[in-house]
Image (cartoon, helix red, strand yellow):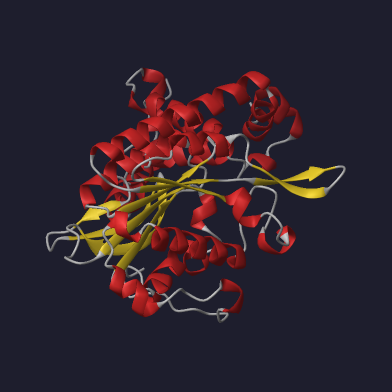
Amino acid sequence: MKRLITPACLMVVCLLLLAEVVARIFFAQDISGRFDYGYNPQAGFSERADGTVKLFRAGGRRFHPQTFKRHRPPGTFRIFVVGDSVPRGPSFKTAYPWFLGDEWRRLGIAAESIKLAGPGYGPRRCQVVLRKILEYEPSFVVLHINDINKYEDEREWRRSQEFKGWHPQHWLMKVFIFRRLYEAKLEKVFWRLVPEAIRLKYAANDADAQVAAAQDPREIAARIKLAEETAIENVAMLRQRHIPIILVTQCRLAEDPGHGICLNDHGMDPLAASLVGPGVYHISMKDVFSGRDLRALFANFSGHMNPEGQQILAHTICEKIELEQAALGIPGAKVAVAGRPPDPSIMGPNPQPVVPKP
């Protein structure tokens, strides 16, 4: 009778165990929150004994590395930017939160601009991040509103819930390496290597499902409703804590047969406008960029901006802060001495803003 467990089988098992141990010991930070898929509030935040907080690229939350004090330094204006890949920008230094530090210094304000934007983050996961940053004494919050990423939020929520279960069918997926290979297949890293006949037989194509969801009228209504509900909850949460907030409603490029390229806010502008009140402000990206050269400012039809567009949005936010300086408790004398910041169109190609250490 053949042995069920052969030396070769034992060797494979040992190698897998060794790889798992190595991953969890030496790459613990990368694995941190990996299988919560953005729904673990602590993922990406490392709170040190010296009172600093380090942001890092956790498995389920790819923050740009930054450092700030847990307790806001006296006299410092601290702003957090929460959103998806639009405020995350082309890179850390070409996204508008990076430009904000330099703009505020021109206003004579000691400021920290901290970016907490995650690719594909929709209303649900942005709200998780928003709740977390309330621990860090924000002076001001910029929250991006869009209805596009609901599909990604729900997909990652299902993944996080599946991973929590201990049904035997999930045991293999508790192994980090197996889980990553499984996800890589779903995310089409290795999927293209699989013969088309097998793909058609077994695949639930995630990209195709996302496109279908984006065109389904019921899904469109559901995602707008979700954006509305979470925006109302977020505003109420910050108002209760007396933290001012700017709601930035995003837009996308769209083809208009009669007028060429135009901007579409997906109905988000009226939503945000209805929430404006004491401590709640609104900036419409559609209004900011209307009448400008859209092809030069936007990188694609998904609403991602080039660095020039990021600079314009940073400048617009600074103008809003200057306009509301009294309500925000910013000393007027500093603004008066510094004067209005220069228009982004005449700024140098490589401005050097002051922000938390990347």
Q: Is residue 7 visible?
A: no
Tally of marks = 0
Q: Nearer the viewer, residue 260 or 269?
A: 269
**Quadrant (top left, top right, bottom left, bottom right) of the N terminus:** top left
Tell me what residue is drawn at x 71 percent, y 64 percent: 296
Q: Is residue 300 above or below residue 209?
A: below
Position of 118 with respect to 110 (left or right) is right
Tell me the residue at 44%/63% (across/down).
318
255 left or right of 31 in image: right
Residue at image position (20%, 60%) is 72
Residue 327 in the image, given as x and y percentages of width and height: 31, 54
- Give the image location of residue 89, x and y in percent: 53, 59
Q: Measured from the top left, where is residue 264 in percent x and y?
A: 68, 42
Name the residue nearer the viewer: 214 or 45. Answer: 214
- Above or below, 87 relative to 165: below
Tell me where residue 160 sits by quadrant: top left
Q: Nearer the viewer, residue 275 or 215?
A: 275
Foreground pick, 70 / 188: 70
Residue 356 in percent (x, y) is at 32, 67
